[in-house]
């Protein structure tokens, strides 16, 4: 495949070297020993270590490895497979997970597509996250994927270079997604449905309201046309204090609730809750 990456310094294409990547202006970015490349410039950091810290990443890894969110992953894989079936690609295709966390969804997507019955394309998979710790863990899932530390507000990809962008339970930047997607590219956006994590939320809030529809539908209007939407719901039973705390650490509630409320959650060793997720597909508008 031709180069997809662009230099975060001068915006020229980044080409692979034996030790990492380099552009024509000789800006070099070496791969860490774990296999990822950090493309966040130090003066663009808003904190010393932006993004999720190691404990949050570990909590997510433990929880996801239990298989509780496998149906969500399967739904995403089906959505991507449908997008690929509609695209007129004959030889190669590129996928970016923007806000990839510790790599769970992208690694499972690669396995699912490799086992699919559709004609095999030469697929290139990339994952970016602003958390160095998350990307470091992602390399443990599959080192053959391209893992990069980068911000979704300044993605290190050339204009019109990618076929599919995934954005899964992560902040979105629709202008940036539109910039890096090809003219007929697609955005697969995954967000909480109206009742997501009810059960946990009922402990946290005196009055539990349904999640509002995601703002992306309006924000994406200038760049994308809605193509498909699906909703996935199922009950979930957590069977230990550790599972409950790992789930809590994956959510914004971990930081937003007070000590008294957190103590109520800490005291639990069983929890019944709802999984409710919406998967939206958008196609980049032409022109």
Image: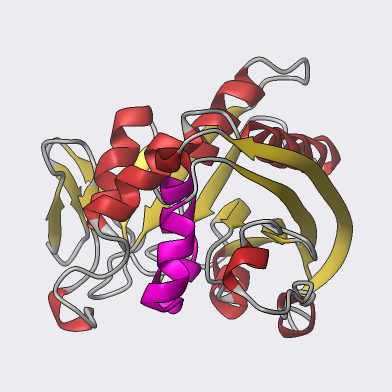
Decide which of 5, 129 is in the foreground and name it.
Answer: 129
Q: Quadrant of residue 241?
A: top left
Give x and y (percent) for residue 103. Answer: 43, 41
Give x and y (percent) for residue 12. Answer: 31, 67
Query: Looking at the figure, which quarter contains the C terminus?
Result: bottom right
Q: How many numbered discs sit on the rendered protein?
A: 0
Does the magenta segment cover residue 247?
yes
Can residue 14 be seen here? yes
- Say left or right for 7 vs 219: left
Decide which of 128, 270 is in the foreground and name it.
Answer: 270
- Identify which residue is drawn at 37% across, 29% down: 141
- Say left or right for 166 vs 183: left
Can residue 1 be seen here? no
What stretch of residues is rendered in magenta?
A: 244-267
Q: Quadrant of residue 71?
A: top right
- Identify which residue is drawn at 37% across, 74% down: 259
Colouring:
secondary structure
Magenta span: predominant SS is helix
115 in relation to 122, above or below: above
- Identify which residue is drawn at 25% across, 59% down: 53
Does the magenta segment cover residue 3?
no
- Say left or right for 72 vs 268: right
Decide which of 133, 152 is in the foreground and name it.
Answer: 133
Give x and y (percent) for residue 58. Answer: 31, 44
Q: Quadrant of residue 172?
A: bottom right
- Identify which residue is drawn at 65% across, 36% down: 237
Give x and y (percent) for residue 126. Answer: 44, 45
């Amino acid at each position: 495949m031709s180069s997809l990456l662009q230099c975060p310094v001068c915006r020229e294409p980044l080409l692979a070297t034996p030790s990492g990547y380099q552009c024509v202006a000789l800006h070099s970015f070496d791969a860490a020993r774990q296999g990822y490349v950090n493309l966040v410039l130090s003066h663009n950091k808003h904190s010393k270590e932006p993004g999720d810290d190691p404990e949050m990443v570990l909590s997510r890894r433990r929880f996801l490895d239990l298989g509780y969110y496998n149906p969500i992953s399967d739904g995403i894989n089906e959505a991507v497979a449908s997008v690929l079936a509609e695209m007129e690609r004959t030889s190669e295709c590129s996928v970016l997970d923007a806000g990839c966390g510790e790599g769970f969804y992208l690694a499972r997507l690669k396995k699912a597509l490799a086992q699919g019955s559709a004609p095999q394309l030469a697929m290139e998979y990339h994952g970016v996250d602003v958390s160095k710790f998350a990307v470091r863990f992602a390399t443990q899932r599959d080192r053959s994927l391209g893992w990069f530390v980068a911000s979704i507000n300044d993605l290190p990809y050339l204009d019109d270079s990618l076929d599919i962008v995934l954005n899964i339970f992560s902040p979105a930047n629709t202008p940036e997604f539109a910039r890096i997607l090809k003219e007929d590219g697609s955005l697969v956006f995954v967000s909480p449905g109206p009742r997501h994590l009810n059960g946990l939320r009922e402990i946290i809030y005196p009055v539990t309201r349904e999640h509002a529809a995601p703002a992306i539908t309006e924000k994406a209007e200038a760049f994308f046309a809605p193509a498909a939407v699906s909703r996935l719901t199922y009950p979930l039973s957590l069977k230990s204090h550790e599972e409950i705390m790992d789930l809590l650490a994956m959510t914004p509630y971990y930081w937003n609730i007070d000590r008294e409320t957190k103590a109520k959650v800490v005291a639990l060793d069983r929890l019944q809750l709802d999984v409710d997720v919406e998967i939206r597909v958008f196609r980049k508008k032409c022109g």
